[in-house]
Image (spheres, grey):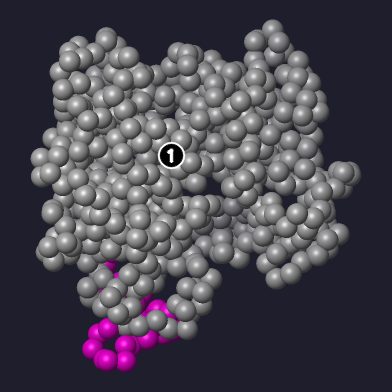
């Protein structure tokens, strides 16, 4: 592990320039001095180590990774006198969102241009790559990488380095499981190309980037072998204040203080997309932002999201309501204040959100609006943990490493891998070798894997191949998934979303998770729209000036405790005894003035399975209604 907090100027700038003779001018000269993470990452990455860089936002992690990684490539290229470009990708930069892909592309476009390295972005928002002229440097998402591996594997046979940005956002999610197998497929592809003489080496160098992650080396080890941890301190002072949310008037009263506080640009986070839309509809036109009240979430079209990002970045005074889509390091200019309408799901998300503010100063200003005393306590737990680095903070940030690899990802990856194979035939025994850790340990029990394969054959995802043996070919369900372009992402029903179209211009506005009948009014992009007609999954709409029938932001607290560590911290904050010490189970009322029935939270601290069993018992014996486990 390399750890430090280097604040001085480059100690030997001449030495650094010599070591980075091909990349210093392009990537680091604009900094004037190396940041701590840039200096510490230099030697390990230049020597070919797999690394994980953990540092605060705006610390130059992207350049810290790319300068030495690209330097190694350029040195090898010039040493072997291999200047001729081949029709293959050399570098992959993986990001969790399309917006971050665009932002990273803007950030590194000129440095790569200086080095004559071609750049492209491959996401669902971008046009397809030309197979005869792929870029050397590709920024993409896991889903688009999945599609490339399945459809254009030869394009990736020369990949020598992979950067995983915002790694903590993948961990212990279905996308994280998917990414682990995609990297195994990439490694297998490289090894095959090397044995066939189509690649000079089978080596792939990996580097993960993260701002907020507990035990980053152990998390990175799920994705690649032997990660070297390079970590720097850089915590900023947190100025967080709590306010009770009583409706729109609470925000308007708060906004009235902005002139005295010298606040001009505010990024507000909500938990739900609909809530973002409702707040924008309610507050647009109000002082001090006027019409500069924006919205950003995943259900908006790419063009509308881009416009919101650009408007917010260039406007001197603006308010933007967003979901997790703006948690990441997208360049939206300097933000004076972070406003949280309700508590996020976990401490990691809280840290990510507050880290978006005041990036050019050592002080982060945060306003936390709570709707119940319990939600106030959640904020208190998060704020205390953000300011400290003790055992409670470590426990709250710790990933639940006991989560098993998801069988649904086995299904999705087998379906995708079938498309990648030479004859579109799958050997289940051979494919099982993909479901392993970087150290070769199985991610799923062999018997369970065989049961999954049997089930897929039974349901006609796969059929025995015509030529016999153990080979499998596509079945009817696989063909349907392929036609719907649903093979390359986790099969969670997102392909069933309805597309919202403006019937005057024909342009796509966004998506809805369910269809609406003609005449319905809803909010999208901060404006009311009325459904004129529907056609299959298409919803044709027109702008609507009247918004009387549009919902107002709800004030009920539907936040859910998702970890035992947070349950214990919250019970402690509320003054309840720890259940694991006394045998007591803390019970707290979360009833609000608008609730007609009494509502409680029961802190059992015993895990999800026990919680469900206890819930069923309480329903049977006490006639209670269990809303969520």
Residue 148 picture location, percent across and down = 37, 61
Near-viewer residue (112 or 617): 112
Q: Residue furthest top?
A: 260
Task: Give the labeled residue for mark 1.
Answer: 105
Residue 232 picture location, percent across and down = 29, 23
Near-viewer residue (135 or 209): 135
Report how many numbered discs are placed on residues in the image. 1
Please tell me which residue is depicted at 41% across the width and 67% down the height of the picture: 412
Relative placement, left or right, of 77 versus 454 is left
Residue 23 figure quarter: top left
Query: Taking 127 as reference, is 281 above or below it?
Result: above
Please tell me which residue is depicted at 49% across the width and 67% down the height of the picture: 486
* 453 magenta-colored: yes
Q: Residues within 10 Å of mark 1 (few under 14, many from 20)?
A: some
Relative placement, left or right, of 299 versus 405 is right
* 482 magenta-colored: no
Q: Provide the residue span drawn in magenta.
A: 443-471
Near-viewer residue (156 or 552): 156
């Amino acid at each position: 592990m390399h750890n430090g907090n280097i604040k001085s100027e480059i100690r030997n700038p001449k030495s650094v320039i010599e070591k980075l003779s091909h990349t210093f001018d392009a990537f680091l000269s604009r900094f004037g001095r190396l940041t701590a993470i840039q200096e510490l990452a230099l030697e390990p990455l230049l020597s070919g180590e797999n690394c994980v860089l953990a540092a605060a936002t705006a610390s130059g992690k992207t350049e810290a990774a790319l300068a030495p990684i690209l330097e190694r490539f350029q040195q090898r290229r010039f040493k072997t006198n291999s200047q001729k470009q081949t029709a293959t990708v050399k570098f992959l930069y993986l990001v969790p969102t399309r917006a971050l892909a665009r932002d990273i592309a803007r950030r590194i476009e000129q440095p790569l241009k200086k080095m004559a390295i071609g750049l492209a972005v491959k996401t669902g928002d971008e046009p397809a790559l030309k197979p005869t002229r792929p870029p050397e440097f590709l920024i993409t998402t896991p889903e688009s990488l999945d599609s490339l591996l399945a459809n254009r594997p030869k394009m990736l046979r020369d990949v020598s380095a992979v950067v995983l940005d915002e790694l903590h956002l993948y961990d212990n999610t279905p996308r994280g499981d998917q990414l682990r197998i995609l990297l195994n497929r990439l490694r297998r592809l490289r090894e095959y190309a090397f044995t066939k003489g189509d690649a000079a080496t089978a080596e792939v160098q990996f580097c993960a980037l993260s701002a907020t992650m507990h035990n980053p080396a152990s998390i990175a080890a799920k994705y690649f072998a032997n990660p070297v941890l390079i970590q720097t301190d850089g915590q900023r002072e947190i100025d967080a204040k709590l306010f009770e949310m009583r409706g729109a008037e609470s925000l308007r009263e708060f906004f009235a203080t902005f002139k005295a506080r010298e606040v001009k640009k505010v990024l507000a986070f909500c938990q739900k997309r609909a809530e973002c839309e409702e707040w924008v509809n309610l507050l647009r036109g109000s002082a001090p932002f006027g019409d500069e009240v924006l919205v950003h979430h995943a259900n908006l079209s790419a063009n509308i999201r881009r416009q919101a990002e650009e408007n917010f970045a260039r406007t001197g005074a603006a308010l933007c309501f967003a979901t997790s889509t703006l948690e990441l390091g997208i360049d939206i200019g300097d933000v004076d204040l972070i406003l949280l309408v309700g508590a996020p799901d976990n401490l990691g998300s809280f840290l990510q959100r507050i880290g978006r503010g005041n990036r050019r100063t050592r002080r982060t200003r945060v306003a936390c609006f709570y709707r119940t005393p319990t939600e106030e306590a959640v904020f208190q737990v998060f704020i205390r943990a953000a300011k400290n680095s003790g055992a409670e903070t470590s426990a709250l940030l710790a990933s639940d490493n006991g989560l098993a690899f998801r069988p649904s990802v086995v299904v999705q990856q087998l379906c995708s891998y079938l498309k990648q194979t030479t004859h579109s035939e799958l050997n289940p025994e051979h494919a099982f070798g993909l479901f392993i850790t970087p150290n070769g340990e199985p991610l799923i029990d062999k018997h369970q894997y065989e049961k999954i394969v049997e089930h897929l054959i039974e349901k006609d995802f796969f059929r025995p191949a015509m030529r016999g043996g153990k080979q499998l070919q596509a079945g009817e369900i696989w063909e349907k998934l392929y036609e719907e372009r649903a093979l390359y992402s986790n099969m969670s029903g997102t392909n069933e979303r309805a597309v919202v179209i403006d019937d005057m211009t024909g342009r796509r506005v966004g998506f809805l998770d369910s269809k609406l009948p003609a005449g319905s009014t809803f909010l999208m992009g901060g404006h009311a729209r009325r459904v004129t007609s529907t056609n299959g999954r298409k919803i044709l709409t027109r702008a609507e000036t009247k918004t009387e029938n549009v919902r107002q932001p709800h004030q009920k607290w539907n936040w859910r405790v998702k970890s035992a560590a947070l349950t214990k911290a919250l019970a402690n904050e509320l003054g309840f005894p720890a259940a694991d010490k006394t045998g007591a189970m803390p019970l707290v009322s979360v009833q609000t003035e608008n609730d007609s029935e009494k509502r409680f939270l029961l802190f059992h601290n015993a895990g999800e399975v026990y919680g469900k069993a206890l819930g069923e018992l309480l329903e049977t014996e006490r006639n209670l209604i269990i809303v969520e486990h």
